[in-house]
Image (spheres, rainbow, N blue to C red):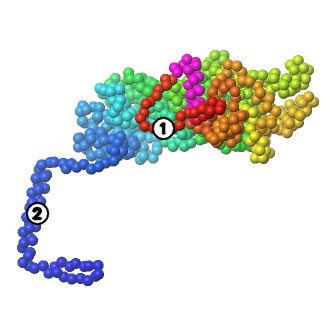
Amino acid sequence: MIVSRFRKGRAFEREIRPAHIPFRRETDVTLIRLMVVYITLFALAGCATVRIDDADPRAAFAERRGDYLTTGVFSVETRSVLFLLGSEAPRCERSPSDCISLLYQVGDQDTESILAVLSELSLAKALRTEQAARGTDSDEVIADYLNAARFAYAFLFLDARPPEERALENRQTRVRDYYNFSVERVATLVFQRTRRADAPVMPVEGTVRDIGQWSLTIGRVEPRLQRGTERLASIVSPTRLQIRGLQNAYRRDGLGGELVAVWTPDVSGQHDLPMRDIGFSPATVLLEFEGEGLDQVLSRREARLLILDPNRSRTTWVRGQHVPVAANFSASYALWLSRAGFRRQGLLSTLGRDTSLMHPRIHLMQPYDPDRFTVIMLHGLASSPEAWANLANEVLGDATLRDHFQIWQVHYPTNLPIAINHLEIRYALERTLAAVDARGQARAGRDMILIGHSMGGVIARLLILEGSEDIWMETLGVPEDSDRRAALAPLEPYIRFEPLEGVSRSVFLASPHAGTPFAGNWLSRFVTRLVRLPADVILRIAAVAEAIAQDLPESAERLRGTPTSIHQLDAANPFLQATSRLGIAPGIDYHSIIARNDPSDPPENSSDGVVPFASAYLPGAASTLLVNAGHSVQQTPEAIVEIRRILHLHLVEHGLIKPPEVRHLHLEGPERGPRPTRDPDTGIPVR
């Protein structure tokens, strides 16, 4: 009897007649027999059921390119090999050791595929071992990564097919990544271990370290102790960093584990030069495995660790193969900026509340190279080297520029009067150049390029002016043979202008060469009251004021008011008025990048919100570009592209590269993006 209940809760019974039962039983038995026959035949046939469903192409590409390193699931090729060997991929993911042992027994069946699978399985084992060890540098963890690197190395360089024959294969790219990651982990864990001991300042070539059954020898070491540092403090993996604030992260594909070497600053006080290496530099590590051929490499446990400087070594030789050296060029710069605390320091320095920055410092973004041209960057008011973050990164992101230029960033206290900062920056640069190139014969000290933003551009221009006599005569009314010169001698260093030796080009960005009304408004006057100057600077200003009081009473009175950089940026300031009339020395090319807030304003009446066009414009410039942007124009793509163009031009003019070929792509469809145009009245390019 079958009982059915409806939602209303009313039940009823339906009686099934006994006469019907025999008929249903016979039907059921027949159906069951047919199903048994069908299942038996299907099993005996051994056929797989194949069907096709719609799929997202992106998912197909993701599966094709995915592997254990990126997704935690073995690659398609590894799963295929494991299937043919009777092993299930999930079981191998849980216990890679068992599957590695199985692959060792396979023999010489498709050695290339077996090596690729062994490298991925070994990497999976190393990752699981390290996770279980909770970040410790045990012998087992390092040995597992050495094994993974060895199988990848054998696949890349000891197989019958050389790497160039597999250049377009996804599998080779993946195996290269297994090698690079494993090498990076070996280097990091070995350094972590040795740092706890009484480690030397730098890894020493020829040092042998025993790691379980492995023997690891330190091979070539290219990085050198950085200037102003004591020892190698740590190494950092860029793969474990998420960089924010830089538009792009520049790296070079190739062989090797990418690292950042972090150096301990020298706080002994013995290093009194104004220059410093930034203390963070890119490094690339490689592992070479001993043995004549595949069998020896796989049977021996001997390896050499090479530590390369990717700024010096673009390529290297491995087993007769010329391969590119991998590198990350942005991570070291980003680490320096993130740990330097420049933003807070820039503001406090402007107000005179930061005593850690009393004099200019010259930060070398990479260890000094005598064969590279030098680009010197000067930031603006209330700023710091952080203002150049994207511009400097984009310059070094260009492989051609990176090979031919090095960047020095000047960090100076922006509260000091411009005349004093100009003098101290000039002195700091001269001392730096004398320290790195005492004979003055290196390319680095010749044909240098100054790049200045805002007040930094004003100072950059002062560094390449000539015409001190014009100020003595026209501004002060004191001829060269006048007896008053002796009385005014204390003033002479601050109004002596001659081009800094070695500079042949300068770029000015949003620079108020003739001053800015912003420096005289109520907000600037209010901020000026908050600014403090160091005691020694106040004494220097007072001494000059006292010396010139009799001959130049008005100037002396102005100096007694303790002028700051903000005072001297005022368009009415006599110092700025006098220097704006001086000319740039012959033989020095200069370029202007001027910002305009409102694109509808005529250039001659425009402003970037701080600096008017008329103050930033310099007649006779080799090029002038007007960018529709605010005062921080150095951060814009238009300004970055223009500076890269100027630097490429510098190389062309020195015969180091050929002029770029102009190629026009004939594409169908509408144009994309506005072309650079020229202002109809001034003819200045506008982007």
Is residue 333 visible in the rendered structure shown here?
no
Q: Are marks 1 and 2 in contact (CB under 8 Å)?
A: no
Q: Residue at x 77, y 44 (%)?
A: 521
Circle 2 sits on which residue? Answer: 32
Q: Nearer the viewer, residue 149 or 311?
A: 311
Tell me the kind of residue under disc 2. Ile
In which quadrant of the rendered view does residue 566 lie?
top right
The residue stretch that appears in magenta:
638-659
Main SS of residues in magenta: helix
Is residue 39 visible in the rendered structure shown here?
yes
Instruction: Work out whether 597 lies above or below 677.
Output: below
Q: Nearer the viewer, residue 291 or 74?
A: 74
- Are there few (<14), some (14-19), or many (20+) residues within 10 Å of tag 1? few
Q: State the quadrant of the N terminus.
A: bottom left
Q: Nearer the viewer, residue 670 or 117?
A: 670
Tell me the kind of residue under disc 1. Arg
Q: Is residue 583 magenta?
A: no
Helix, strand or loop at label 1? It is loop
Q: Is residue 242 left or right of residue 152?
A: right
Circle 1 sits on which residue? Answer: 672
